[in-house]
Image (tube, rainbow, N blue to C red):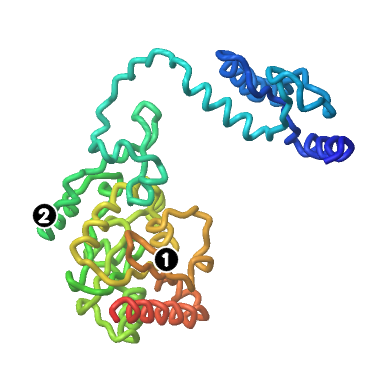
Amino acid sequence: MSQHTLAASARVLEEIGVGPIWVRRHLPAGTADVAATDEVESVQLMQAEAVVTTTAAPASAPASAPASQPERVIVSKRDAILAAAAAIQQRPSAPAQPAAPSSDDGLPPWLSEMDGADMVSSGFMPYDDEEDDEPVVRVNPAIATMDWSKLKETVADCQQCGLCKGRKKTVFGVGDEKAKWLFIGEGPGRNEDMQGEPFVGPAGKLLDNMLVAMGLKRGENAYIANIVKCRPTDENGKDRPPSPDEVASCIPYLQRQIDLIQPTVLVALGKTAALSLLGLDPATPVSKLRGTVHRYRDLPLVVTYHPAYLLRQLGDKSKAWADLCLAMTTYADTTN
């Protein structure tokens, strides 16, 4: 390659920020680490191209030139940095600092070590220290081993979050405890809070009709539950979606229900149920989640509209039926 071509290539590389670095080959023993360390420090601190120049033999030097004369080679910045990093790893490391004393956060070790993303995907939410004046979510690890009787008793007496203060009855869930279909809503409303059963009243009647259209029936091969077991209300006593900390406090109960039921297909009814199960941004609309088979704890999950929404938007009933057809197709594919 001609000197003119080399110069042009160097200018192009320099313009896009990956200009060449001149590094010495055949360095005397003991100097490679120092040169490599200087190279990394220059890149990190100055954020500029580092150039190490050496004296080179002319391109036309005869083959009989002394073997000890250093050569000049051109390498990429990435290769130089990788080489320098490898050299640094061989240098003596600083004495390890003593670990800070750990505090008992009330969670088992495997859960305390999880990062935020892992906790969300597992159904648990991270919580802040009490001194930060943020809601503290305490998860009872014993929930994961409870049978139906103990789980129902625990839910009835639950005081994991502030929703317990305004409830009349907890709404555990209803249906076939070995059902292949699990329908999950947001949380109890006024009627559900009064009766202690999910999806009663007009929205419940519509859901029952949806089940019949699928060849199902409440209590027969179908189970109905909610993300939270107590009714969330605002300061005016009106229904509202549960907050993230309320969801985090209550969703372990739903997870245990799923483990005990072992359903084949999950159907999320409405935005809150879908986003809570999938751990998505609160601004995500249901329309973006429809038409796709999602996965929750390795189970197929289909998202559709909440029956209460369909009572207000009758025109979307056909879309909900398309979602249920997708769920039935998924069920058939899974069982065949």
* Location of residue 203 with respect to 243 vertically, above or below: below
Residue drawn at 47 percent across, 21 percent down: 90
Residue 152: x percent and y percent?
15, 57
Under circle 2, the secondary element is helix
What's under tag 2, amino acid-wise? Lys
Whichever of labels 1 and 2 marks the residue nearer the N terminus, that label is: 2
What residue is shown with label 1? 294
Q: Residue at x 37, y 46 (%)?
A: 118
Q: How far apart are the alpha carbons under marks 1 and 2?
A: 31 Å
Query: Dot 2, crowdedness within 10 Å: few (<14), some or many (≥20)?
Result: few
The residue lying toward the viewer, choosing from 29 and 324, is 29
Residue denoted by label 2: 150
Point out the frontmost of discs 1 and 2: 1
Q: Is residue 228 left or right of residue 82?
A: left
Q: Residue at x 53, y 66 (%)?
A: 288
**Residue 251 visible in the picture:** yes
Residue 319 image position (x, y, % from top left): 49, 79
Residue lying furthest front in this view?
64
Residue 85 located left or right of residue 196: right
- Residue 115 occupies which quadrant of the picture? top left
Q: Quadrant of the N terminus?
A: top right
